[in-house]
Amino acid sequence: MAVRIILLIVSITIPVAETFDCSGRHDGLYEVGCRVFTKCTSGTLTKVECRSPEVVNIDTGSCDNPRDVNDPCGTYRDCQSKDDGKYPDLERNCQYYFTCANGRFMGHNPCPTGLIFNKDLQVCDWFQHVKSPCGIQPDNSP
């Protein structure tokens, strides 16, 4: 007789001992992205990673269905005709990027404050190093 166990995990909560310190901080969310956030509760740091397709809902402090989450994390992008990779979100002034894999939208990520997404390098970068339309470098693509 085979026994099947079905386990539905909405999010993974992992205690972390990284450089971020919750000592003296108010309870709440810190280092928030669209899929991952750190949470301080009574001085204890916890890293939360949302399971796809869920994203971070800043209003509730938890993982949630994208249709119940405000922009940009709740915004869907069509990846069916895109190659695998990361793309600047032009509607968010390139301060966010989204990832496509196997024709599927994998979610948004923010760039650190002051940086924008550099599609050529696939990283967040200073605007003066990024080609137009995000940065000021000329785009000489054919």
Image: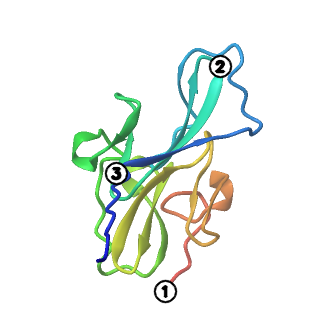
Closer mark to the observer between disc 2 and disc 1: 2
In 3D space, how far apart are the residues under numbered discs 3 and 1 (Cα atoms)?
A: 38 Å
Q: Do the residues labelled 3 and 1 touch (CB within 8 Å)?
A: no
Closer mark to the observer between disc 2 and disc 3: 2
Residue at horizontal 30 percent and vertical 38 percent from the top: 70
Mark 1: amino acid: Pro
Residue 101: image tag: none
Horizontal side of 55 relative to 20 (left or right) equals left
Mark 3: amino acid: Glu
The residue most toward the bottom is 142
Q: Earlier in the sequence, mark 3 or mark 1?
A: 3
Mark 2: amino acid: Gly
Q: Is mark 3 on a helix, strand or loop?
A: loop
Q: Are marks 2 and 1 in contact (CB under 8 Å)?
A: no
Q: At which x and y percent is residue 57?
A: 36, 37
Name the residue tied to disc 2.
43
Horizontal side of 57 relative to 13 (left or right) equals left
Residue 142: image tag: 1
Question: Which residue occupies the foreground of this view, 136 or 15?
Answer: 15
Q: Is mark 1 on a helix, strand or loop?
A: loop
In 3D space, how far apart are the residues under numbered discs 2 and 3 (Cα atoms)?
A: 26 Å
Q: Is residue 109 above or below residue 62?
A: below
Q: Which of marks 2 and 1 is nearer the N terminus?
A: 2
Q: In which quarter of the image is the N terminus?
A: bottom left
Name the residue tied to disc 3.
54
Question: Which residue occupies the foreground of this view, 26 or 90?
Answer: 26
